[in-house]
Image: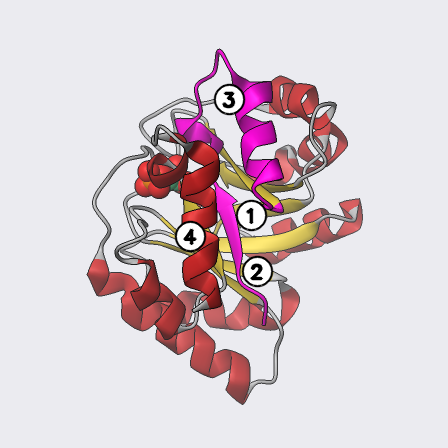
Amino acid sequence: MSIYLSPSMLSIDFTKIGEQLAMIEQAGTPYIHLDVMDGVFVPNISFGIPVIKGIRKASGMVFDTHLMIVEPEKYVEEFRKAGADIINFHLEATEDPKKVIDRIRATGAKVGITIKPKTPVEALKPYLAEVDMVLVMTVEPGFGGQKFMEDQIPKIRQLSEWKKELKLGYDIQVDGGITQDNVRIVLDAGANVIVAGSAVFGKNDIGQAAKGFMDIFKE
Ligand code: DX5
Ligand code: ZN
């Protein structure tokens, strides 16, 4: 399975969005991770539909949209129209995950489902056959630049085992506190889509930081 880097735009310099997106695109990064926060599901507010719509005009990358919002089912069509290619929602944010999955699927976007650190991985099991991606949070969602929670690694391993056992093809994404120094652990556990915010956009040479991750993926 191919391994992808998905740099998180949360850590971008918002006065230089176009320029910095071009840097990671030129470095060969196919994905951009878009963290949408509503101040209710998480204690922070980031950006939403108009921003995604705006950058869609300037970027051919895969828009990997991570919705940290309550009642995601209400907004999936709007995010799709704005340009989201993958729509990831939180299992904890809805009463009816199946309904959200179906709504996302109906828009034509790829479907992702996400769990917070305190949610057991077993909670994902009923939905594994229905999704294209599972996302394991390795920090409490809400902010970039937090410390990686190593105790979440068994979840990645479990999802990787279930994938083989059940002969499924979902991507395993990991998000939170990933750096070039710890990414090897999550790759070895079976993750194949790696989110990194501060470890890419927080660096002086953004293109080089993205390339550094991709070199590790090849090892
Ligand atoms: C946190 C977000 C992450 C965050 C990652 O709620 O979901 O995507 O931007 O940032 P780093 O890589 O700095 O932990
Ligand atoms: Zn995220």
* Closer to the eye: label 3 or 4: 4
Q: Residues within 10 Å of mark 2 (few under 14, many from 20)?
A: many
**Mark earlier in primary sequence (3, 1):** 3
Residue under numbered circle 2: 133
User: Residue at the spot x=36%, y=73% of the render?
Assistant: 189
Q: Give the range drawn in magenta.
A: 1-30
* Frontmost residue, 69 versus 206: 206
- Look at mark 4 in the image and give the residue it sits on: 213
Q: For residue 17, what is the image quadrant?
A: top right
- Which residue bears the numbered disc 3? 47
Position of residue 33 relative to residue 215, above or below, is above
- Image height of 62 relative to 157, above or below: above
Q: Does the magenta-highlighted stretch encompass residue 20?
A: yes
Labels 4 & 2 near each other (Cβ < 8 A): no
Which residue position holds label 1?
Answer: 88
Count of marks, rendered view: 4
Type of amino acid at the residue the image marks with label 4: Phe
State the separation of the CA atoms marked 3 and 4.
26 Å
Q: Where is residue 159 in the image (x, y as percent from the top left)?
A: 44, 73
